[in-house]
Image: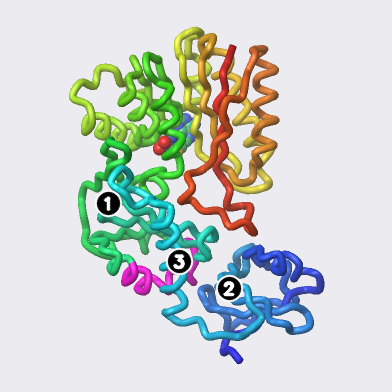
Amino acid sequence: MHSYPILQLLPGRERSLLNRHPWVYSGALAKKPSAGLKSGDIIAIADQKNQLLGFGHFNQDASIACRIFLFTQSPIEIDTQFWQNRMQKAWQCRQDLGFFNQENAGYRLFNSEGDGLPSLVADVFGDTASLQIKTQGMMNLKSTIVDFLQKLGLKHIYLKSENSDESGWLLGKKSDVFFEEQGLRFLVDLELGQKTGYFLDQRDNRKLVGSLAKGKNVLDAFSYSGGFSLFALQHGAVKVTSVDASEQAIEICKKTVAANFKDESRHHTVMANCFDYLRDIPGNEFDLIVLDPPAFAKSAATVEKAARGYKDINLMALRQIKQGGLLFTFSCSHHISRDLFRKIIFGAAKDANRPVRILYQLNQASDHTIDVFHPEGEYLKGFVLYVG
Ligand code: SAH
């Protein structure tokens, strides 16, 4: 037996759960949940014959009514030890993969569904962890999470919640958080920065930019804290231009460049809307362009509009890049599949009327784990294009 309220599914709606997909949409429930149930409660999910399918966190008034964290037909009690084991497994996976090393002091420790910890993200930057928690169910586990991270030796923990009242330091406030990635020092703005404060998902792709940047004039469009710019500068780019619409992103980028290079004359920042900036760049100027925009498609309903946005920026870059230039182009919307993104690039290349070869197909860094049963976890896709 277990002590959790049971939510039953409509006939046939158990199929996705039998395939271990962890999201239960409110429309899949046989009955409206009882009024006593509140967001964050642990619930048991059962099929129409009352066969137990798993346990999850309930979310009131959300389209995803329940996020399953355990698929099982045997009733169990979910205690602190259960969560500690889950976190330990995520940690073990990073240990096995060697993420926690001298070269990379930054890595993703918990990646939500990818680690069986729905809605919990933890990025580690040296002795500091930055958490993002999106559901009440995970929020209720805050102290268990902090205990675990403290045992790992982390000294500072910041929580970035969707609800800004809940955001703040959970352990040891710290003002400037710097960490090292492959010989470069990066500044993480936990309090005002975006997402967890730094985009670790582009780690491998930045390294690739570095390896191809020597002697090049580089444009880093949607630069945020300048991750790509820094790698290009480190590896001998002759000029690097970082463009972002956010004043604060430009400030972090400038500070980061200053923390790494005595002579900053090769680096230029521009605060601008990249759609306008790209429209006006002269042809035959940039040898290497990075396009790493925010997710244009936040929902399935906005895919078409987003596709137009992706096509526009790629078309402008493909038109203007030098002959023999390299375009690193990304989409981080999980609603835009790799296939669709490739079709968008195809359309842009056709309109730009230039020969385009695909050199590399890129992904999110592997500490941003993807549960094979939850394809939505694969959000970042990129192509490196050679433009003849
Ligand atoms: N390339 C970065 C991450 C980019 S995140 C890195 O490696 O860290 C996306 C960035 O796009 C954010 O910094 C955001 O401020 C910026 N942005 C969003 N819309 C923009 C627009 N229309 N023009 C310019 N920058 C934009």
Secondary element under disc 3, as helix, strand or loop, is: helix
Seen in the picture, residue 173 relative to 254 is either above or below; the reply is: below
Mark 1 → mark 3, Cα distance in angstroms: 20 Å
Q: Amino acid at mark 3?
A: Lys
Front residue of this view, candidates 369 and 251 = 369
Where residue 289 appears, as percent x and y from the top left, is 48, 22
Residue 295 sits in quarter:
top right
Residue 384 sits in quarter:
top right
Front residue of this view, candidates 255 and 202 = 202
Where residue 115 appears, as percent x and y from the top left, is 50, 61
- Residue at 58% x, 84% y: name it: 36
Q: Is residue 224 left or right of residue 136?
A: left
How many labels sit on residues?
3
Residue furthest right in the image: 11
Query: Can see residue 313?
Result: no
Where residue 337 appears, as percent x and y from the top left, is 66, 41
Q: Which residues are magenta?
A: 134-148
Mark 2 → mark 3, Cα distance in angstroms: 14 Å
Q: Main secondary structure of the magenta part?
A: helix
Dot 1 corresponds to which residue? 126
Dot 2 corresponds to which residue? 70
Dot 3 corresponds to which residue? 89
Q: Quadrant of ligand 1?
A: top left
Q: Is residue 31 left or right of residue 319?
A: right
Discs 1/3, front? 3
